[in-house]
Structures are given as structure tokens and as C-alpha cells.
């Protein structure tokens, strides 16, 4: 599982927008508003897709080490 920190995620509307886009892409994920992150369960391609989705939505995603 890869954790992507999303500092710009502030509210339930942000979670809704991210979830809708991740669902559309068919990704296995969890969005955590409290910790401001998105957990991606999948390969490198899945993580890359998730990062692109976040960027397209206007969020800066950073993979946590």
C-alpha cells in the first residue's frame, strides 16, 4: 500500500471529488480526511494514475516514505 499525503484536502467535498475520480479510474483506495492522505493499494501504475488524478483535481500529492 502506498500513502499519498494531500495537504490541500480540507473538507468532505474534497473527499467526495477525490473519491469520485478514483472510482471512475477503478482504483483500490481509501481517503482519510483526518490524516489528509489517500492510500492506494496497487502497482506503480495505480499510484501514478492516482497522482495524476490528484494533480488534475488541483491537489498536490506527495508520496510518503
Image (cartoon, rainbow, N blue to C red):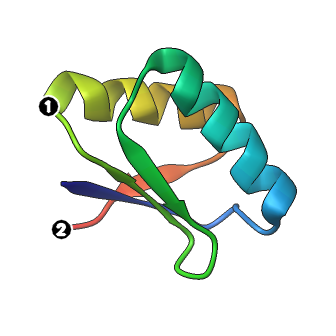
For image coordinates 38% across by 23% down, the residue present is 49
Q: CA distance from mark 2 to mark 1?
A: 16 Å
Q: Position of residue 21 (x, y in %)?
A: 63, 27
| Eye-nearest disc, 2 or 1 | 1
Q: Nearer the viewer, residue 55 or 18?
A: 18
Using a 10 Å C-alpha cutoff, classify the residue at mark 1 as few (fewer than 14 neighbours), some (14 to 19) or many (20 or more): few
Q: Position of residue 15 (x, y in %)?
A: 71, 54
Q: Is residue 32 left or right of residue 50?
A: right
Q: Secondary structure at mark 1?
A: loop
Question: In this view, which residue lies farthest toward the top?
Answer: 25
Q: Are marks 2 and 1 in contact (CB under 8 Å)?
A: no
Q: Is residue 58 left or right of residue 5?
A: right
Locate the N terminus by quadrant: bottom left
Q: Nearer the viewer, residue 26 or 33?
A: 26
Dot 1 corresponds to which residue? Answer: 43
Q: Quadrant of residue 47?
A: top left
Badge 2 or badge 1: first in the primary sequence: 1
Question: In this view, which residue lies farthest toward the left?
Answer: 43
Query: Vertical placement of 32 versus 57: above or below?
Result: below
Q: Position of residue 58 (x, y in %)?
A: 72, 38
Query: Vertical placement of 7 versus 4: above or below?
Result: below
For image coordinates 61% across by 67% down, the residue present is 7
Dot 2 corresponds to which residue? Answer: 65
Q: Is residue 58 left or right of residue 39?
A: right
Q: Is residue 32 left or right of residue 11?
A: left
Locate the C terminus by quadrant: bottom left
Q: Secondary structure at mark 2?
A: loop
For image coordinates 70% across by 62% down, the residue present is 9
Question: In this view, which residue lies farthest toward the bottom?
Answer: 34
Using a 10 Å C-alpha cutoff, classify the residue at mark 2 as few (fewer than 14 neighbours), some (14 to 19) or many (20 or more): few
Amino acid at each position: 500500500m502506498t500513502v499519498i499525503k494531500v495537504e490541500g484536502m480540507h473538507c468532505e467535498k474534497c473527499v467526495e471529488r477525490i473519491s469520485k475520480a478514483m472510482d471512475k479510474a477503478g482504483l483500490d483506495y481509501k481517503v482519510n480526511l483526518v490524516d489528509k492522505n489517500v492510500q492506494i493499494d496497487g502497482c506503480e501504475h495505480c499510484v501514478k494514475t492516482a497522482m495524476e488524478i490528484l494533480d488534475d483535481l488541483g491537489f498536490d500529492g506527495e508520496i510518503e516514505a
